[in-house]
Amino acid sequence: MDALDLARWQFGVTTVYHFLFVPLTIGLGIFVAGLQTAWHRTGNEQYLKLTKFFGKLFLINFAMGVVTGIVQEFQFGMNWSEYSTFVGDVFGAPLAMEALLAFFMESTFLGLWIFGWDRLPKKVHLATIWAAAIGSNLSAYFILAANAWMKHPVGYEVVDGRARMTDLWAVLTNSTALAQVPHVIAGSFVVAGGFVLAVCGYWLLRTRADMWRRAARAALLMTAIAGAVVAGTGDHSAKLMYEQQPMKLAAAEGLERDTQGAGFSVVPGIEIPKLLSFLSTYDFEAPVQGTEDLQRRFEQQFGPGDYRPDGTVVFWSFRVMIVFGLATVGLSVLGLWLTRRRRPFPAWLSRAMLLALPLPLVAVIAGWLLSEIGRQPWTVAGELLTASSVSPGVSVAEVATSLTIFTLLYGALAVAETVLLARHVRKGVEEQAPVQAAEAPREPSLMY
């Protein structure tokens, strides 16, 4: 391996690891805010206990996400200085907005929520967790807008070998970003819902406490709704991919030649006729470009080189994403149906809910592999090749050393995260005593 390969591995390892925490933070923050709102409106002490229980899990995950995310910033300068030089003037605005506006909002109000119990008025304290949760989602928007620009660069011009922003609004409202943001955020709610389901499944196997049923039903509903949004936004993203990233679409389907009325490959050797053309354009007879024909055109447009991504990884990542995502959403819909009208959770369903923890995580990681590896060999589509983005003068030994250190460090953090979460889950809610008196109890407004 050369320095470029090792740098790609390092960024891939740190990014995938960091993204284990990001979707859970995005979705779990809203879920905790919803639980506290239910306590505020109903006065039911169970909601307070659940708020504090899942709130602590949220805080553990949030802290780990911040720690692992910082490393990525250093890598831009250490291993990818040419990339940073090229995109810096464009990325500066959305990333500054993320740090100064969204993350500042998120961390400030989260601190007020942590230390505001018994110190802030009840409504003000409730507003702090909503502000923190909204800040998490706003932070995701700015980062995803920057990421979308790499796939579909708009609102810029190249001056002296650097991309210079000419239209901030175009960058923030990039069509790729407007499709990617709701897709990723909805996927984050599926991950958070799966996490809550696994925790509730663990406790429903040990107790019949009604609070776990309430939390599980809320998580089932959140997961089912978010899954429908993921499917809808994913369909829209596929149509944008057909227009903006045809090589990624062809690689995801293993389509080598331009095909009129292209079929959808379920697995190698099993194909649904003309479905790919329909999913891409709503036209069963629409032409879809293949990797080999696109390679020939790209060589004519950009010069000699291999412009095809790793077909095996892209092909199977797409299918893993779909299968694992559908399994999670299917479990949530089944669970809602089986527990309707206050029917108890069957023991087998509680056990199955434990699978809701790994399934959506695998799905979102596979989705990012599809998204980022499918963009290769570009860091910025049509403008900057990955091979031209690496820092000059960085040796194989230097990158290998940092890769080893980061991998070991992240492995240790993974153990710490798992131990902390597992310890808190096993403890349950016995010690989560109420700290404020509730006002004006009313009937729950959520569906249980």
Image: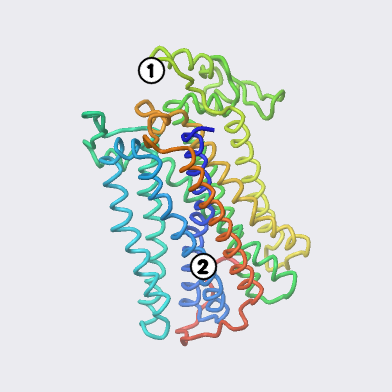
- The answer to whether residue 71 is above or below residue 316 is below
Q: Amino acid at mark 1?
A: Phe
As drawn, is 122 to the left or to the right of 444?
left
User: Residues under labels 2 and 1: Cα distance?
Assistant: 47 Å
Which residue appears at 38% of the width and 73% of the height?
A: 111
Q: Nearer the viewer, residue 395 or 202?
A: 395
Would you call the spot at circle 1 few (<14 residues within 10 Å), some (14-19), or many (20 or more)? few
The residue that mark 2 highlights is: 60
Residue 404 position in % (x across, y down):
54, 49
Would you call the spot at circle 2 few (<14 residues within 10 Å), some (14-19), or many (20 or more)? some
Which residue appears at 63% of the width and 71% of the height?
A: 425
In the picture, which quadrant includes the N terminus?
top right
Residue 129 position in % (x across, y down):
41, 70
Contact between marks 2 and 1 (CB within 8 A): the answer is: no
The residue that mark 1 highlights is: 302
- The answer to whether residue 272 is above or below residue 395 is above
Give the quarter of the image for residue 145.
Answer: top left
Q: How many marks?
A: 2
- Check disc 1 and report its element: helix, strand or loop: helix
Which residue appears at 50% of the width and 53% of the height?
A: 18
- Check disc 2 and report its element: helix, strand or loop: helix
- The answer to whether residue 256 is above or below residue 194 is above
As drawn, is 352 to the left or to the right of 250?
right
Give the quarter of the image for residue 255.
Answer: top right
Asked whether residue 176 appears in the rendered view, the answer is yes
Residue 267 position in % (x across, y down):
69, 29
Q: Nearer the viewer, residue 128 or 431?
A: 431
In the picture, which quadrant includes the C terminus?
bottom right
Q: Amino acid at mark 2?
A: Ile
Give the quarter of the image for residue 254.
Answer: top right
